[in-house]
């Protein structure tokens, strides 16, 4: 899979994430005027979130895939994982610098709440300021651990890899259940248990991404899928409909994502669509870090005053993209400093 293909998939994933966070809650959906019909007893815009809920495993998979490609191209000590982790945290702190003061002005009941809450959010231990930040600290930890994890996987035999996936999947499910059922106050240092569980949750899909690089699975599968011609469009539609019927449970993400990605990579999309998705893929980190502020945390659901789902979605994409340019303007000089040896 080329870097351009990765950006396309990231672009798809970030658009899925924005749709998911806008329309997963029926209380907010009920405030919309329907431009889309009902499906299986619920508004289609809500049911589509069952597909969009796979954005997180797609991101984790792509993280493992991308870092495994870097590992193949450079010696272990030249992967630059500490700098990658620092760059992501710096990007995050730039977002905090812009949005937390804004939150203090517009929504002072939530921001900053207390010094402890502020510090826990700035370190990523807590994500009470922005629910989408739950992904940040576990992914940073995963990035730091990736050289050892990737080296271990690359040195395994096929049988060992297959056996390894069993405990990783059990940990994946157990960590998901634990994180969903823990009840810890946001301002408590014990909130660090959440990033720990989410780190364990991510290990499985990250490792699967590494295995796809190791065995060249996309290179083997995608050309064969392309030979199916228009049938692959039919298969893609069936897969999406099945996911819409079956729901959001984490157990469905593995077969869905592993079937979805080769189908998406096999599509001969027009250049304009590919370029657009790559464009969103390049802005995906900042859009992930900022979009929840516009939807809920600072502006308190004001975006739903637009009423029409597609207009709401387009507005969230637009303001998240605009904020990404602002964040990028501040972060780019800092990133150059971080990358210097």
Image (cartoon, grey):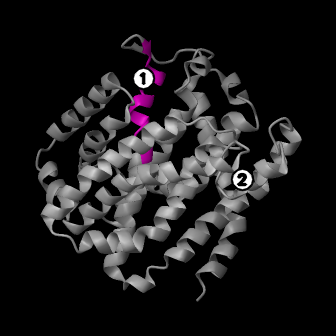
* Residues rendered magenta in the picture: 42-56
Q: Secondary structure at mark 2?
A: helix
The residues bearing labels 2 and 1 have C-alpha atoms spaced at a distance of 34 Å
What quarter of the picture does the N terminus occupy? bottom left
Query: In the rendered image, is residue 120 in sight?
Result: yes
Name the residue nearer the viewer: 314 or 73. 73
Mark 2 or 1, which is nearer the eye? 2
Q: Secondary structure at mark 1?
A: helix
**Quadrant in which residue 311 is drawn:** top right
Q: Position of residue 74 (x, y in %)?
A: 37, 83
Q: Along the horizontal axis of the image, is 235 left or right of 210? A: left
- Circle 2 sits on which residue? 120
Q: Position of residue 253 (x, y in %)?
A: 33, 40
Q: Along the horizontal axis of the image, is 106 left or right of 130? A: right
* Mark identifier at residue 291: none
Q: Position of residue 122 (x, y in %)?
A: 72, 57
Asked if the stretch drawn in magenta spans residue 51, the answer is yes
């Amino acid at each position: 899979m080329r870097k351009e293909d990765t950006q396309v998939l990231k672009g798809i994933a970030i658009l899925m994430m924005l749709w998911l966070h806008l329309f997963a809650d029926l209380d907010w959906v009920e405030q919309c005027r329907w431009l889309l019909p009902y499906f299986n007893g619920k508004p289609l815009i809500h049911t589509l979130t069952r597909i969009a809920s796979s954005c997180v495993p797609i991101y984790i998979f792509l993280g493992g895939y991308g870092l495994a490609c870097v590992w193949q191209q450079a010696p272990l000590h030249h992967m630059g994982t500490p700098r990658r982790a620092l760059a992501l945290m710096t990007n995050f702190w730039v977002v905090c610098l812009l949005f937390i003061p804004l939150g203090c002005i517009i929504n002072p009941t939530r921001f900053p709440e207390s010094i402890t809450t502020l510090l826990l959010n700035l370190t990523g231990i807590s994500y009470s300021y922005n629910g989408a930040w739950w992904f940040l600290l576990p992914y940073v930890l995963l990035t730091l651990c990736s050289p050892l994890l990737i080296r271990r996987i690359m040195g395994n035999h096929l049988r060992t890899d297959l056996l390894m996936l069993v405990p990783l999947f059990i940990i994946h499910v157990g960590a998901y259940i634990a994180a969903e059922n823990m009840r810890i106050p946001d301002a408590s240092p014990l909130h660090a248990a959440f990033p720990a569980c989410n780190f364990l949750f991510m290990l499985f899909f990250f490792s699967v991404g590494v295995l796809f690089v190791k065995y060249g699975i996309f290179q083997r599968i995608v050309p064969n899928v392309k030979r199916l011609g228009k049938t692959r469009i039919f298969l893609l539609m069936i897969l999406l409909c099945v996911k819409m019927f079956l729901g959001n449970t984490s157990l469905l993400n593995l077969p869905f994502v592993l079937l979805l990605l080769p189908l998406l990579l096999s599509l001969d999309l027009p250049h304009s669509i590919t370029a657009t998705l790559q464009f969103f893929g390049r802005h995906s980190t900042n859009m992930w870090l900022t979009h929840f502020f516009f939807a809920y945390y600072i502006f308190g659901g004001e975006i739903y005053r637009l009423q029409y789902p597609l207009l709401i979605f387009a507005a969230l994409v637009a303001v998240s993209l605009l904020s990404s340019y602002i964040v990028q303007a501040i972060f780019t000089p800092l990133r150059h400093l971080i990358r210097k040896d």
